[in-house]
Amino acid sequence: MPCQISDQDDTVELETAEELFVALELTPIEADKEILSQIGEGMLELVTTDEQFLLILEKVLDTRGASKQPYLKCFGTQLSQVVTKGSTLFKGLSLLANEADQEYFLNSLGQEVIRKSIANVNDLVEALTWLYGKMDILFIELIGWDFVLKFINSGRSLGAIMKVLSQEEEKELLERMGWSSVINCIQDADDLMAAFIGLEQESDRLLIDKLVEFNKLQAVIPSVAELDRVCRRGLGAEDITYLRETYQKLLVA
């Protein structure tokens, strides 16, 4: 069903998201809110795919710091119909300019929809990357730590997620995993380097100690050449010295 909008003396009917995009192009930004109010829940007739949702989200109310909630509210409780992919989730977050908009967006989607849209660790990391202020806390509360943990199966995935968490969130994740599970993720030097890059510096030495405790440091770093390679990535000078000294002790033990 077409949506009718009026601006000054002009009235047009819109049948597609592309036609809405053109209408927004041809009218001043100041008219965006009025256009959205005229369309209202009819937005679901125009915008029916993830791609169309992002097209209009980027265009509408496109002034620095402007709230895009008037657009989001046009979808009512049906926002989930146009946010079905991880890429839509994180691109949507990247286009929302403030915490209030992101909070509305995340709460409107809810746990089930957000979880369904996140298919892999990259989707999760990208979403976490674009969160403002305290929205990372809300995001993790919505999806749950159990959901985060299921994407961690290697040092690479561990490091990627740790890199976008706050220090307190990192501590909580490590506690929830337990060091046995953390060490199981570290299978080779590349895993270890990824973990070092992602972890806060204070956790690096603890990881070294745990690898020794679990008799795994030499398995992960099988040669001095590999040790040299590891020391070039993700470690501070003091931790490099500590790793080399620890490794040398194992060689002569």
Image (cartoon, rainbow, N blue to C red):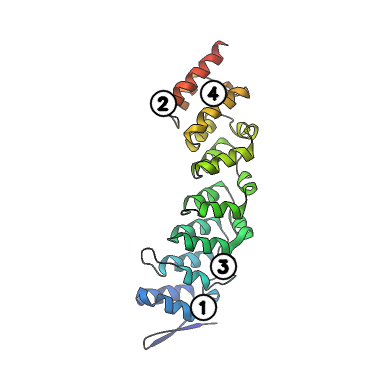
Q: Secondary structure at mark 3?
A: helix
Which is more foreground, mark 1 or mark 4?
Answer: 1
> Which residue is labeled 2 in the image?
237
Q: Looking at the rendering, in which quadrant would you find the N terminus?
A: bottom right
> Which residue is labeled 3 in the image?
79
Spatial CA span between label 1 and label 3: 13 Å
**Do the residues under discs 2 and 4 have CB atoms within 8 angstroms?**
no
Q: Is residue 202 above or below residue 136?
A: above
Which quadrant of the structure image shows residue 252?
top right
Q: Percent from the top left, x then y, of residue 95?
A: 44, 60
| Number of marks | 4
**Do the residues under discs 1 and 2 have CB atoms within 8 angstroms?**
no
Point 43% across, 65% down: residue: 58
Which is more foreground, mark 2 or mark 4?
Answer: 2
Spatial CA span between label 1 and label 4: 60 Å
Q: Looking at the rendering, in which quadrant would you find the C terminus?
A: top right
> Which residue is labeled 1 in the image?
40
Q: Is residue 222 above or below residue 35?
A: above
> Which residue is labeled 4 in the image?
221
Q: Secondary structure at mark 4?
A: loop
Name of the residue lying farthest toward the bottom: 9
